[in-house]
Structure formats: structure tokens, C-alpha cells
Amino acid sequence: MFDVYGRQNLFTFAGAKQHAERKKLLAHAYSKSVILSPNAIAKPLIEMNVKNYLELLDREKSVAEEIFQSLHWFSLDTITGFLYGEQHGGTHALRENETDRTLLNDIIDPSRRKLSWYAVHLRDYTKWLYTRTGVMEKIVGRFGLLPMKKPATYSGIRAHALQSWTGYETTVAEKDPDRDLAIVDKLWRSSKNSKGPSLDGLDIASELADHFLAGIDTTSDTAMFAIWALSRPQNRIYQEKLINEVDGILDTDCNEDGNPTAEASSRLPYLDAVLKETLRLYAPLPASEPRTFSVDTMIDGYLIPAGTVVSMSPYTLHRNPEVFPEPLKFNPERWLGHCGDLTEMKKWFWAFSSGGRMCIGIQ
């Protein structure tokens, strides 16, 4: 489902060895120490986009009243800047670039859901449908057999991603190899390292395109649900406590624009609790997260035959009343040890999956 430009990437490698080798190239760039490092691209990028977003809310009343799209603009600008840098694919949706804003059309098209179902359950048939040309393509279109009209989901995003890589590749000789900035820089340098796995241009383009897609919905939907939950009358007390925590940030921990630095934000326990509770109730990927193994396996006394797909559901795990008292209630203070066994709750918290396939973007 996630193959891009005919190449596999971190999301699609089934083999543990291939997956681990690719993840090794990327994991350091996504670590908390690097995200917060003033010398890396993430920290100043996030702080700049926070400033741009707050200015947008002040400037456009309609944006402040309907935050779904604008939060997507925020996450779009952040992930593209992190992956490609300012010059080679970074977007400016927050700065009212209409071309960049239209990239989200792929994301919000409802027929995306149907195509996703087809791509998982009828993979070969779906591939066949979208590779028809000439007369057969016209027949497929006329009879409405395509789950989503061409160009299909992710087409705009993947076209932008490929164009971004192509632009980078044409100027790569001019780049300083010692710079430690965007992900594209790191992957390009690793492709020149004979000791590591060899990546060609399309491998890098494929990898970046899927990180691009993965970083939009997840970030923006979580922020949207956090804001929505805090705005509900019954949760006013949590909003006030969060405001008090933010008001307590010292001036020395703020940027020139008056907003808290990324480091200061990472040290706010109540904000952390609010985000954890948001992810518990409104995980951006709440449903089936499939796993499979190549040999027969015993799990909790059950024989799982080789090749069997086993799925876990964060939505279900996060609503176990034996672990999360009053599981349907939004209560950030449960993550401060005020409600339930904190150690047990952390074991059941699965918004980012766990193990070797755990979400690389957790920080």
C-alpha cells in the first residue's frame, strides 16, 4: 500500500533486517536530542511555524473559527521543511501559498477511504485497475470501477515529493557535505557511504515521500482533538491548569516573539499529560495495526500459524476500564498518577505502536 515510485521504504519492508537497516539511517535524525538541538533543522523550524500559525490566527478570523485546515497547513509546512529544507521542497501554506495549500486535497478527499480499503484487501486488483491504459482505461473509468478517480490519493503529495528530490539532486554537488540539516541531506550522505546500505535517487525519493504523507494527518489531527477536548465546558478546569502552567514559563525560556521555546515546551508536565490523554482517546491511527511472522508462534497459549495477520487496535486497548478508570472521560490528570496505575497505563498506551516498528516520529 505504501510503495512509492516502485520502491520499498521504511513503511513497507516486511523483513526485519531490511527494516532495521533503513531505520538505522533515520532514527538519529528523529531522536529527541536532535529535534531539540539548536544546530539541527527541527527546533527553529517548529518555533518559526508556531509563530506563523499564531499570526495567521490573529490575521484571519475565519481561520481561527475553523482550525482543521490550518492545522494541516502547520503540519504540512513542518514536515516538508524537516524533510527537504527551505530550498528543495519546504512548503509555505501558513504564508498563504495557494499551490502548497492545494496539496491537502489528496488528504481530505473522502474517497481516499475506499481506495485504502481496496489497496489492502484487493491489492493486485487495485494495481491492475490503475495500470490500465488506452481503451481498457476508458472502459474501467466509464463503468466506475476505480475506487477513486485519477489522479488518485497521494498523487499531488508524491508528485511534489519527487519534484523536491529531483531539485535537490540537481544541486547536490554544490551542497556542503558537513551540513546536518534536512533528512534529505542525511540520506544523500548515507548513499555515498560505501559501508552502509546503498540507496539510489528513487530509494531516497520513496523514503521521503512516505514520511511526508505520514507527518501530515497524524500531527494535525492530534492537535485538533487536543484543542477540541480542552474547549468543551466540562474540561474547562484542564484548560485553566494548562494556561497556568504556560503562564509560569520564564521570559528566559521564550523566543524574541514571546512564544515558549521548543525546549521549554518539552518540559511542561501538564501539557505532556494533555497530549497523552488526547492520544489515548483520539489516536490518529486508532484501528487495525497488523503484524505477521514467518514461523508458527505461541502467544499467550494460542498457536498463531506462520503468515497469519494479527491486528492490534489502540482504540480498544485505550478503553480498557480495568486499566483506565472511566475510560471514556477525558482526564489528563490520570497521566500524573491521580487516577489508575500509571505503570500499567503506560504498558497499554499504544498510540505510537511499540517494538521495532514503533513510530519513528514519536518525538
Image: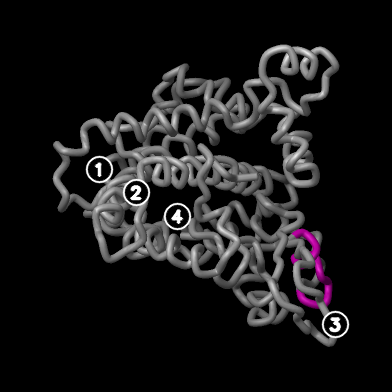
> Which is nearer the N-term, disc 1 or disc 2?
2
Q: Which residue is drawn at the image coordinates 56% and 54% (left, top)?
A: 11
Q: Which residue is drawn at the image coordinates 58% and 57% (left, top)?
A: 275
The residues colored magenta run 315-323
Label 3: how many residues lie within 10 Å, few (<14), some (14-19) or many (20+)? Answer: few
Q: What's the amino acid at mark 3?
A: Tyr
Identify the residue position indicated by label 2 in the image.
Answer: 183
> Which is nearer the N-term, disc 2 or disc 3?
2
Q: Nearer the viewer, residue 56 or 208?
A: 208
Q: For the residues marked 2 and 3, what is the alpha-carbon distance in whole angstroms?
A: 42 Å
Task: Please determine whether, in this image, residue 199 is positioned above or below residue 59.
Answer: below
Query: Mark on residue 246?
Result: 4
> Which quadrant does the N terminus fall into?
top right
Q: Nearer the viewer, residue 225 or 75?
A: 75
Residue 147 lies, in percent from the top left, at 78, 28
> Which is nearer the N-term, disc 1 or disc 3?
1
Mark 4 and mark 2 in contact (Cβ < 8 Å)? no
